[in-house]
Amino acid sequence: MDLLLLYVQNFILTLLTLGIYSFWGTTEVRKFYWRHMSFAGQRFEYHGTGKELFVGFLKYLGLLLVWALLVGFLIAMTGEKGDSPYMLLIYLPWVILLPFGIHGAFRYRASRTSWQGRRFIYRGDLMELVKVFWIGALLTIVTLTFYLPFFIISLRKFFFENLTYGGHKFTFAGEGKDLVPDYLKTVLLFLPTLTLVRFWWEAKQNNYSWDRTTFAGAPFRSTIEGKQLLIYGLLKVVGGLMTLGILVPFIECEQVKYVFGNLWMPQLPAVNLSAPSPDADGADALGEVLSADVDMGDGFGL
């Protein structure tokens, strides 16, 4: 019920402020989820602010405006009229900035998330991510998506192995070839199952990735099931339509409970998590806004 009231509040205030409050609304929803998630009896906290997202949006808007003016100037100088081929340049920033958005969003979300009063730190190198991203993206296109399992694993490896907490690193030992059989099965069954097989593919990716992730030598385990994800997906569609969206927050809460209730560590890391926590790792919200513009999701996973 609390989440439903929060959604209603966000909707009303976003309308009244012509969309401006949406940045604060997004932050409040994240704070709600974060403070209701716990590990080893300790709750997570989210320290992002609506102001940070709004400032990030203004920076993003400024970049787009400058780019649009440059493209307009180029068209005017070349005397192009009508459907100028230079108009395609308008869409170039969304392509070029994809890795920047992912990098910035992960850094921002990690630096704004704390557990036991200490924040997570992401130290990934942007240029290295650009290389990993575009090599993987191009190979995925050239191979008609069959490189996708390797692309997914390479990105997860990059982000996990550049994430630390309390001075200790995460490690990732997954390999793309392990996901190939399940991906081929997903491709073959995608149309016959009316795309519903994607829920089993999502569960497989999630479980495989966490099962090969360790923190300070201690492994994670994940046991979510595709059929349960399918049930939540169908409930959100059917329940949302029948109740004009009122049931959606309740279903989302149950889904988050299910996913995090099936993620645990068989043994806690035997380390002293005494390293001081930096304030915010110098991360701003520009990348976060970019990632939202290309629909990177809510940030519960990678």
Image (cartoon, rainbow, N blue to C red):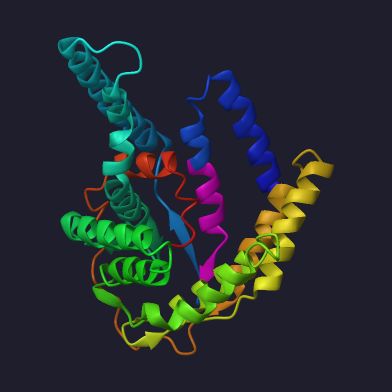
Q: What is the residue that sits farthest to the right in this orientation?
A: 242
Q: Residue at x 27, y 29 (%)?
A: 89
Q: In the rendering, at what x and y percent does residue 250 appear?
A: 72, 53
Residue 211 appearing in the image: yes
Q: In the rendering, at what x and y percent does residue 169 appear?
A: 27, 76
Q: Residue at x 50, y 77 (%)?
A: 40
* As drawn, 19 above or below 75: below
* As drawn, 255 above or below 272: above
Question: Is 79 situated left or right of 165 in this image?
Answer: left
Q: Residue at x 39, y 81 (%)?
A: 177
Depth check: 136 or 273 in front?
136
Classify the position of the C terminus by image quarter: bottom left
Q: In the rendering, at what x and y percent does residue 7 appear?
A: 64, 39
Depth check: 42 or 206 in front?
206
SS majority, magenta = helix
Question: Is 193 situated left or right of 39 in this image?
Answer: right
Residue 32 in magenta stretch: yes
Which quadrant of the figure has residue 186?
bottom right
Residue 92 in magenta stretch: no
Residue numbers of the magenta segment: 27-39
* As drawn, 70 above or below 129: above
Q: In the rendering, at what x and y percent does residue 154 appear?
A: 32, 70
* As drawn, 82 above or below 190: above
